[in-house]
Amino acid sequence: MFENIYTPVQKLEITPFNNLFVKRDDLIDPYISGNKWRKLKYILEKAKSHNKSHIITFGGAYSNHLVATAAASARLGLKSTAFVRGDEVKNEILLLCKLFGMTLIFTDRESYRDKEKLFNNHFHHEDNAYFVDEGGASAEAVIGCAEIVDELIDSYDHIFCAAGTGTTAAGLLKGIQKNGLKTKLHIIPVLKNGSFINEEILKYTPHSENLVLHLNYHFGGYAKTTPELFNFIKSFTARTGLLLDPVYTAKMFYAIIDLQKQNIVNANDKILAIHTGGLLGIFGMKDKF
């Protein structure tokens, strides 16, 4: 299932940009899309190599990571279980998880904070259980995300990516360093006080002057939005035909356009945006469109 994959790079015609491109990782798979596929690639390979047959992971009720893990586990013949943060609910995302055979354990927010304890309390007796952190954060995930840069045929002045945990960002920076590129990497944290992402990146890669974090595009915090952001999504998608999700990619593209207006990014520079997928997250906010 995890063969090498090369997603297309598409040019976007948006005034005033002359060289704005997007790497369409959202096209990898309808359920294991974008950076979820990249992260899980080596995580699940490692699990199988250690003869682990039961994947245990974590996420919220609208987590794309849960769907991706459930789908990938099913295709590899692995059992999967997820600790779901919050009260028991039913929605489209969790329905997909169940259809892919995932067992859901709803967990109060206080208990959810200690994921290692949850894992040990429930699965200490099970030798085949394998811990996968929320969002897939791990060294294996960083290696998978670094391959995004390996796939690029052309060089770019700037690469943009949204970030929640910093794992994808770390992979991109590792790929830039590995390939000896001078590309500036712009990271858009999607939650308040996102400066910690710099520290997360440095767990996996050396410091680089080419790394820039833009901290003012969180729109209130993780999975938080504003009417301005929803209007942007509707306008952007109608103009380009490219779907965005409200949690990650919409904030990234809003930032790219706003940074150009501030002359921080030149409209003539060659810019690549990484579309990290996650489009199922739209269902969590369908009443706002």
Image: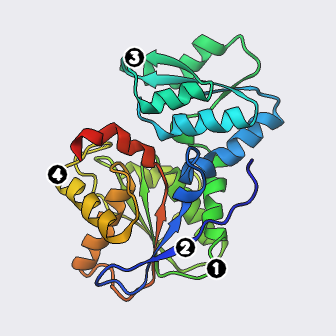
Look at mark 4 in the image and give the residue it sits on.
227
Spatial CA distance of label 4 from label 1 is 38 Å
**Measuring 26% from the left and 59% from the top, which residue is drawn there?**
234
Residue type at mark 4: give it.
Answer: Pro
* Nearest to N terminus: mark 3 or mark 2: 2
Q: Which residue is mark 2?
A: 9
* Quadrant in which residue 265 is drawn: bottom left
Indicate the secondary structure of the residue bearing disc 1.
loop
Do the residues under discs 3 and 4 have CB atoms within 8 angstroms? Answer: no
Which residue corresponds to mark 1? Answer: 153
- Measuring from the top left, give residue 63's x and y in whole percent: 45, 36
User: Quick one: SS at disc 4?
Assistant: helix
Badge 3 crowding class, 10 Å Cα cut-off, few under 14, some 14 to 19, many 20 or more, is few
**Of the residues under marks 3 and 4, which one precedes in the sequence?**
3
Q: Residue at x 62, y 66 (%)?
A: 175
User: Pointers 2 and 1 in contact (CB under 8 A)?
Assistant: yes
**For residue 174, which numbered disc appears in the image?**
none
Residue at image point 44% right, 49% down: 279
Classify 10 Å Cα crowding around label 4: few (below 14), some (14-19), many (20 and above).
Answer: few
